[in-house]
Image: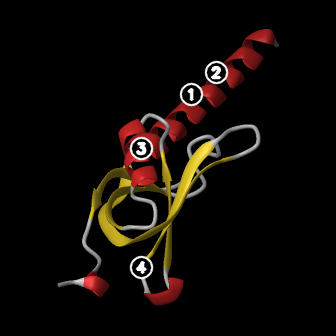
Amino acid sequence: MKKSLLITLGIILALFALVYAFIYFVPYSDGIRSGELIKISHKGVLVKTWEGEISQGISGAQIFSFSILDKDKEVIDQLQEYQGQYVKLYYTERFATFFWLGDTKYFITKVEKEQSPHFRN
């Protein structure tokens, strides 16, 4: 009885590890989005995650929500510095996410400051 319980628990843990590895390491897509950075926050009750939004249209008509992993300190610092400015975000989309990684499936890997297309000289 104990042996079958241990085998069952081992199989469940192995399946969870495989699902986690697939979600964490296998990207669904990669891309770039540009817009005005309107929000960057560190939110959560038990587990804090970094979340943000950019506006891709006039008067916030199209909002792109994203998450940033805690390990990407340089990206977090840049986003806090560029708050309210036009930015280009490089992201990786995953199949799904876990609550301790972030609220969205889009994870920012790099950020660059851009000139706004609305105010070109």
Instruction: Please state which of the two labelled residues, at mark 1 or mark 4, is closer to the viewer.
Output: 4
- Please tell me whether residue 102 is drawn above or below residue 60 in the rendered image: above
Q: Nearer the viewer, residue 106 or 15?
A: 106
- Label 3–label 4 contact, CB within 8 A: no
Query: Which marked residue is nearer to the observer: mark 1 or mark 3?
Result: 3
**Disc 3 to disc 2, C-alpha distance:** 40 Å
Neighbours of disc 1 within 10 Å: few (<14), some (14-19), many (20+) = few
Q: Which residue is mark 1?
A: 14
- Do labels 3 and 2 touch, CB within 8 Å? no
Which quarter of the image is occupied by the N terminus? top right
For the residues labelled 1 and 2, the Cα–Cα distance comes to: 6 Å
Q: How many C-alpha atoms fall within 10 Å of the one at disc 4: few (<14), some, or many (≥20)?
A: some
Q: Which mark is on residue 56?
A: 4
Cα separation between marks 1 and 4:
41 Å
Give me the disc on residue 10.
2
Q: Callout 4, which amino acid?
A: Gln
Q: Residues within 10 Å of mark 2 (few under 14, many from 20)?
A: few
- Say which of marks 3 and 2 sits in front: 3
Residue 49, horizontal then vertical, whole percent? 60, 44
Position of the C terminus by quadrant: bottom left
| Residue at image location 56% in from the left, 54% down from the top | 51
Q: What's under tag 2, amino acid-wise?
A: Gly
